[in-house]
């Protein structure tokens, strides 16, 4: 996507989130990624929304680059890329839209300390962590509000 493409909200999901709802429901809940997409589209209303998931870092970099100019914003759950996805971090530095980092769980309240150390937080506009999949909806709502304020 280039700047000639219509502005959209990009909801980008990292590795293993395609399996959401299949395991660890006590941490991640019972909703599937399809449920998350439905939630995001309901929150976006008439605004275009691109919803994607990948297990490949290069693909995530390509999607961030594609959203670098003139887009409404990015909602990203980087999943395990959160901790070592430096190519994604560099790509995020180049975008001109707001970026909301979303984690379903509270990454600061997990069993392993490394889960709290997001490398993405330093470049994103805001972070929502620990509100379950509802965090995605709140992030989409925030991006829509910012877009309306620009109009
Ligand atoms: O809480 C989040 O949303 C996470 O970003 C999820 C990541 C995890 O590595 C982060 O620490 C926190 C991915 C978890 C693994 O994917 C799952 C897939 C299916 C069911 C449960 C987890």
Image: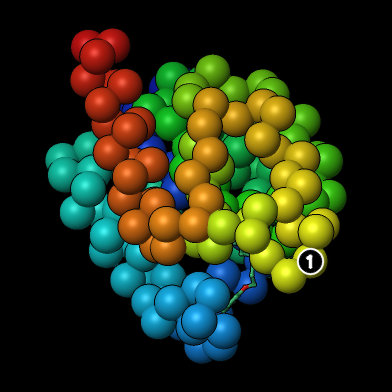
**What is the count of numbered marks?**
1
> What residue is at 49 percent from the left and 45 percent from the top?
128
- Residue 57 higher or lower than 143, as above or below: below
Q: Is residue 32 visible?
A: yes
Seen as rendered, the residue at the extreme left is 46
Seen as rendered, the residue at the extreme bottom is 22
Q: Position of residue 140 (x, y in %)?
A: 33, 42
Q: Position of residue 123 (x, y in %)?
A: 67, 27
> What residue is at 59 percent from the left and 23 percent from the top?
95
- Residue 46 higher or lower than 115, as above or below: above
The residue nearer to you, when weighing 84 against 46, is 84
Residue 96 falls left or right of residue 31: right
Q: Position of residue 34 (x, y in %)?
A: 36, 72
Residue 109 falls left or right of residue 126: right
The residue nearer to you, when weighing 97 against 23, is 23
Residue that carries the numbered disc 1 in the rendered image:
112
Residue 151 falls left or right of residue 125: left
Q: Position of residue 8 (x, y in %)?
A: 35, 35
The quadrant of the image that shows the C terminus is: top left
> What residue is at 42 percent from the left and 27 percent from the top?
71
Q: Is residue 91 visible?
A: no
């Amino acid at each position: 996507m280039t700047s000639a493409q219509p502005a959209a909200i990009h909801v980008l999901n990292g590795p293993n989130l395609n399996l959401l709802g299949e395991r660890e429901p006590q941490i991640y809940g019972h909703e599937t990624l399809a449920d998350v997409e439905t939630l995001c589209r309901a929150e976006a209303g008439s605004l275009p929304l691109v919803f994607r998931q990948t297990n490949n870092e290069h693909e995530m970099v390509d999607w961030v680059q594609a959203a670098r100019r003139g887009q409404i914003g990015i909602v990203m759950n980087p999943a395990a890329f959160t901790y070592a996805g430096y190519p994604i971090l560099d790509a995020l530095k180049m975008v001109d839209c707001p970026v909301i980092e979303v984690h379903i769980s509270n990454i600061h309240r997990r069993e392993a300390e490394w889960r709290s150390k997001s490398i993405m937080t330093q470049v994103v506009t805001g972070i929502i962590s620990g509100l379950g999949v509802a965090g995605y909806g709140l992030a989409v709502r925030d991006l829509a509000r910012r877009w309306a304020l620009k109009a």
